[in-house]
Structures are given as C-alpha cells and as structure tokens.
Image (cartoon, rainbow, N blue to C red):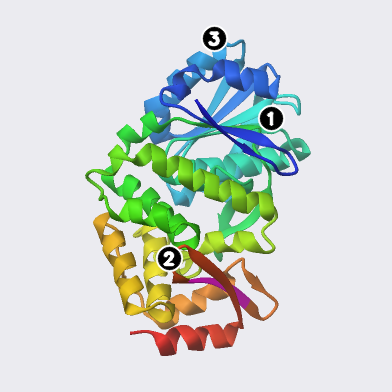
Amino acid sequence: MKTIKVNVSSSYDILIERGLLKTCGSIIKDTVKCSNAAIITDDTVNELYGDALDSTLRDSGFSVCRFVFPHGEASKCSDTLNKIYAFLCENSITRSDCIIALGGGVVGDISGYAAATFLRGLKYVQIPTTLLAQIDSSVGGKTAIDLPHGKNLVGAFKQPACVICDPDVLSTLTEEILSDGMAEAIKYGMIRDEQLFDLIASHNLSNVANVIDDIIYKCISIKRDVVENDEFDTGERMILNYGHTLGHSVESYYNYKTYTHGSAVAIGMKEMAERTCSGEITKKLIDCIKAYKLPTACDAPMDKLVTLCGGDKKRTGGDLSFIVCEEIGQAQIKKLPFEEFVKFIIETGK
C-alpha cells in the first residue's frame, strides 16, 4: 500500500492500493474511531460498490445507513443537500459519527460540504471512484455545491479524515468518464511536471491503463505539495485552476449537461494555451488532449463564455485571477481587471 500524508491544519493520509475498497472497513474504523457511518453515494456508484462498502464497514463493527441520490452535476445543489441533512437527522447521526463519501467529484463535494456544516462539523472519509476524484477533487479539503449563477459558489474547507484510493474501481468507468479524469491529469503535467505530461502524452485512452497507477500517484503528490503550501487557496493553490476559468463557463453555458467537467477544462486549457503559449507547446497540448478523446472547442460564442467568467470564484473586487502555462510544467498566476480580461480573451482569440 502506498501512503501520501497531507500535512495541513487537520492532517490525513491518502491510501492507495488495488482492492482496497472491499477491505477498508478496519482502516476507516481505526481512523475515525466511531461506531456509526452514513454512506453518501449516487445511484450509479451504489449499484457497483455500495454493498461492498457496506459489508466491510459492518464487518468492522459499524452501524451503517446509506443515502443515494441521482448521479450527475445537476444533483450538486441545495435541494439534494437539504435531503442529506434530513437523512442524517432521521438516522440520528451525531457529531461523534462520520460520513463516508463513495463516488466521484459530485458525491465528494456535496458530502464534504454536508460534513462541514451538519451539526457544525463531523468527520468524513473520501472514497473516490472516478479518476478525476482520485487525483483531484478528493484531495485538499474543498467542498461545495453549485448555484444557478455558477459552479461551487457555496462551500467550505473541510479536510477528510482519510482518502481511500482504489485504482481497481476505474475498470468500471465509461470511456467518457475516464477521459474526464485524464483532463485533470494533463492539467497537473502542464502546471508542475513536464515528465508527467510526457508520460501522459506518450500514451492514449486505449493504453493509459498500463501507467495509470503512476499517473495517480504523481498527480496526488503534486496536489499534496500545492495544498500544503496554500491550504486555503489564497496564493499558489490557484494554479490548480488552469483551464478552469473558461472551463467552468463552458459547463455553465450548457447547463452542466453537454460537457463533462474534464471536457470543459480541456477546452479551457486549449483556449488559454492559444493565447499565451508558443505554437509548438500549443500543438503538444492539443495533441495530448485529442489522444484522450477530449474536445478542444465548443460552439458557444466566446463573448458569452468570457462574460460568464464574471461569476468565477477567483474574482476579487474588480479583478480576476487566471492561470497561464507558457512552458509545460510551469504555471503562473495572472490578474487583470475583469474588463481587461474580457478584452484579452476576445482580442487574442484565433
């Protein structure tokens, strides 16, 4: 088993091992030291792994209840959150109990926010079941729900008690969801690690399984380092949003239905690269994106997309912070007044 320790205000371990989901009950028991666990998951993941997790928890002495909601970004909203609160009340969950998030980014985000706010906070464990969640959203303590005005606009920092990462669960992912996660992996290469980018670029969607364990470990290690340096996202951690400023606008423009998060981020990375990188680096990025069957463009008018960036969380006062990678492996934080950012995007587009 590989262990990555995250040393932040509430330190925790990320445990990585194939087959771990089916045997993690004792690890969770030793970590949270409680007797009642509320599993929160979505309908897709519940069918695949809900019973296996329930079984290992009960074998380790937990009393278990389970809340299941419809999969998809549309469920990451206040209505689902209120249903989770009601479920926790109905099952007499107390501050000495724990929540276990079993699923992808949506499950992890909303479960973590429930754990941060219900009874002013209780322990929770992340068990990410998508590549994107394993390498990105389950690590670092960001939790949130969406509003009609934008993505992740209501949230809290809440570090998990531990993260259980089982690469075996990736075998059940659809090609689309695996591609979704690879967009974030490409992002990590672009912002911090040229060797990681080259490893990803030397493979494609059909054979990346041969190196996926290495990719997972490298991506988590990068995020760990960044989060340790900037837990509350006021400086260096902003680099993790490479491709996300325009990417979130793509998601919002299509009402979170047409493009997955990773697909939108891929478009955002490509658009930013065209405006800030040499032709050679831009081509490398585009070729890599295409190798994982991710899009590089959408039909939405750029003037509409850039206007939606006004709701981005990185906007402070009249300024917007955004990330550029002029060289692979090197990220920079830029800041412009919002009106100048709009002008920059519109006037430098191809």
Q: Residue at x 63, y 51 (%)?
A: 227
Looking at the rendered structure, the secondary structure element under dot 1 is: helix
Q: Residues within 10 Å of mark 2 (few under 14, many from 20)?
A: many
Relative to 1, residue 12 above or below:
below
- By secondary structure, the bulk of the magenta-drawn segment is best described as strand
The residue pinned by badge 1 equals 89
Q: Nearer the viewer, residue 153 or 124?
A: 124
Mark 1 and 2 residues: CB-CB less than 8 Å, in contact? no
Q: Residue at x 25, y 57 (%)?
A: 291
Quarter of the image for the C terminus: give it.
bottom left
Residue lying furthest left: 206
**Structural distance between the alpha carbons of marks 1 and 2:** 49 Å
**Structural distance between the alpha carbons of marks 1 and 3:** 24 Å
Asked if the magenta segment contains residue 322, the reply would be yes
Tell me if 230 is positioned left or right of 289 in this view.
right
Q: Nearer the viewer, mark 1 or mark 2?
A: 2
Q: Nearer the viewer, residue 327 or 109?
A: 327
Q: Nearer the viewer, mark 1 or mark 3?
A: 3
Is any part of residue 186 visible from this angle? Answer: no
Looking at the rendered structure, the secondary structure element under dot 2 is: loop
Q: Quadrant of residue 85?
A: top right
Asked if the magenta segment contains residue 136, the reply would be no
Mark 1 and 3 residues: CB-CB less than 8 Å, in contact? no
Q: Quadrant of residue 38?
A: top right
Magenta stretch in the rendered image: 320-325
- Labelled disc at residue 328: 2
Relative to 216, residue 316 above or below:
below
User: Callout 3, which amino acid?
Assistant: Asp
